[in-house]
Amino acid sequence: MPRPFSVALPPWLTHALRAQRGPVPWNAVLRGALAAGPLLLAAVLAGRESVGVMAALGAMLAGINDRPGSRRTAVHRIGVPGLAGASGLVVGTYAGEGLGAVPLTLILTALGLLAGAVSAVGPVSSGAGTQLLVAAAIGAGMPLPEPGWQRALFFLAGGAWLIALRLALPTPGALAHDFRFDGERVAVADVYDAIAELLAAAGGEQAGARRAALTAALDHAQDALAGPRLRRYASSSAERRLRAQYAAALPLAEAATALAWAGDALPARTAEGPRRLAVAVRTGEPCGPLPAPARSVPGLRALDDALLHAAETFDRGGKQTGGKNPGSRRIDGEKTHSGAALHSNAGTNPLDRGARQTAHKGLRLRPLRAKALLRTVTGPGGREYGFRVALCYGASAAVAQALHHVHWYWLPATAVFLVKPDLGPLVSRVLNRAAGTVLGALVFAGFAAVLPRPEGLVALVAISGALIPVATRHFAAQTAVVTVLVLALVMVGGEPEASWSRIGETLLACAIVLIVGHLPAPGQRGGNVRARLDAATDAAHAYLTHVLSGADDRAARWALRREAYRKLAEARAAIDRAAAELPTLARHTEGTDEVAATLERLVDTTTACAVHLDDTGRLTPRHTERLATLLDELVEQRERAGLADPPADLLSA
């Protein structure tokens, strides 16, 4: 029988066609509909259209950063980029008014260098750098009657309005429990579900993917609970309960990872306990008796102890106190842990002490200090990205002004989005941006021909704002929606319909970014990937050193383990994006995926060593041989990939 005909598409094209999946975030859709549109409507009714344009722009850019998560993290994720955008408006407005084309281009290029380097720190910094540059270009090129400080004020008001909506409007199911902690509760419940999925997949082909999913769930919950706060410690019983439930998940995740590393399939009842805990987190109801696994191997004994500790934590509602009546009970002939079955030494054993410290003092062991931030910004990743952004942004501004276009800001603003590596590989970004702009411009041209003005345009802005949370799943869709929204704002502000000029400017920006992206750069290419791999290696080294030292500080160990897996996930994401580039760019990071895979196996093995040391106080030959093999492989693979040697004390561990 002949094989069916199939065509294997290259990675750079498959990435351009890939879209995220998931349920529609109706709460974010509602916020989007109530953000830019009503602000613009209020300004139009007051006869201050230009003010409404600035406020709507602030709300639109805030909406792009309005991702799923807790309210606390939303304030940080939306507010920091908003402040950066307001600063960019001030700088761009006054520079555009007082400087000629050449000095203005130099100022914008310097801003691009700074914003690009700072974007290497993380997602929030990347969003801040983007808004800084977009707002600077708009401030320098958009003709508005207000001075720079007023533009910045109204821009901030738009972002603040969306934050207020995020804080005030309930999300589905939030009113059934504590209104303030909806995203946090879902994030913690997802951790327990991910633990159950990993236990169910142990011994199978999906174990690696489930372990990565557990890392993502833990990262999300950690961010949700560790966001900005007015007080250092939890200030309510609901928050203390959630933090305690998250801390109780850490030893469960550790034991599940060790069992997956062992490679043996587990009975189905092993995953039932974490599933019941997930339901208890979501509903706020008692978890009930938890099926206890057989205590036949160190990993199962660690899982059993962690389940009993979780039962204690859920039973006392997050209170950090000891209990009585140690042990477990049997129901229907099977051993289960009861929430009332508490350790007699609760609060003194290492597991309980570590959970209390984690829940009380915080979820991060080594916060990013000023020196580490500076090292990231000035490191190879920051330098390479800063160079690319500065060159693209400056060249786009220079070309736009040389063409004597009245509203030239669209070209550098477009280049800013195109040059962002966290939006995907270069060619994928260019294809999606071009397709999205063409589609959005055509859609707007059709609506502009029939809609009444300005009320029809205001309605179009509101509808586009509502679509942004859904459109963020694909860069082309997001570009199309944002194009419609911005073109509507431009017309409300008094400018003529500009669909066709926007298409030409976008295609020109695509060409500039493609050329600059393939130019040789100072130093070694792939700086972002190499920097993230080095950070992951350092984190793995710190974790392995702590485990082999025999230290009994569980809170420190869990924090180091979390940092190691988080850094690995960041490195893996950067490697996957680089691998989907055109071959001329992808070749600069060849071999880095092997390094990341070895580091993941090393951290998994370190976790298995930690669990075994807790149980027996010594390692088996399987553990030591596996560690030695992985360390040797790490040296060879880093050498083949052109990376620096790992720390010497890591090799001698």
Image (cartoon, rainbow, N blue to C red):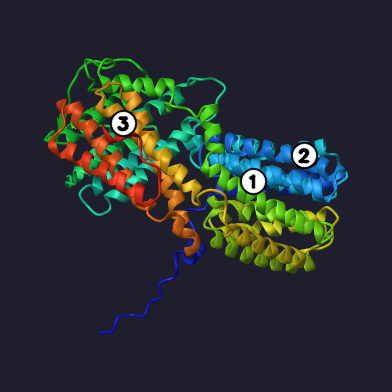
Give the image quarter of residue 646: top left
Residue located beneath label 3 in the image: 649
Front-most of residues 113 and 297: 113
Question: Can residue 35 be seen in this snapshot?
Answer: no
Residue at 22% x, 23% y is: 341
Task: Report x, y in % for residue 35.
Answer: 68, 45
Q: Residues within 10 Å of mark 2 (few under 14, many from 20)?
A: many
Residue located beneath label 1 in the image: 130
Lower position in the chain sequence, tag 2 or tag 3: 2
Give the image quarter of residue 135: top right
Residue located beneath label 2 in the image: 91
Front-most of residues 21 and 616: 616
Q: Amino acid at mark 3?
A: Asp
Residue at 78% x, 43% y is: 92
Q: In terms of secondary structure, where does tag 1 sit?
A: helix
Question: Can residue 229 be seen in this snapshot?
Answer: yes
Residue at 35% x, 46% y is: 212
Q: In terms of secondary structure, where does tag 3 sit?
A: helix
Q: Is residue 239 above or below residue 436?
A: above
Q: Residues within 10 Å of mark 1 (few under 14, many from 20)?
A: many
Measure the alpha-carbon separation of dots 3 and 1.
Answer: 39 Å
Residue at 50% x, 52% y is: 525
Q: Residues within 10 Å of mark 3 (few under 14, many from 20)?
A: few
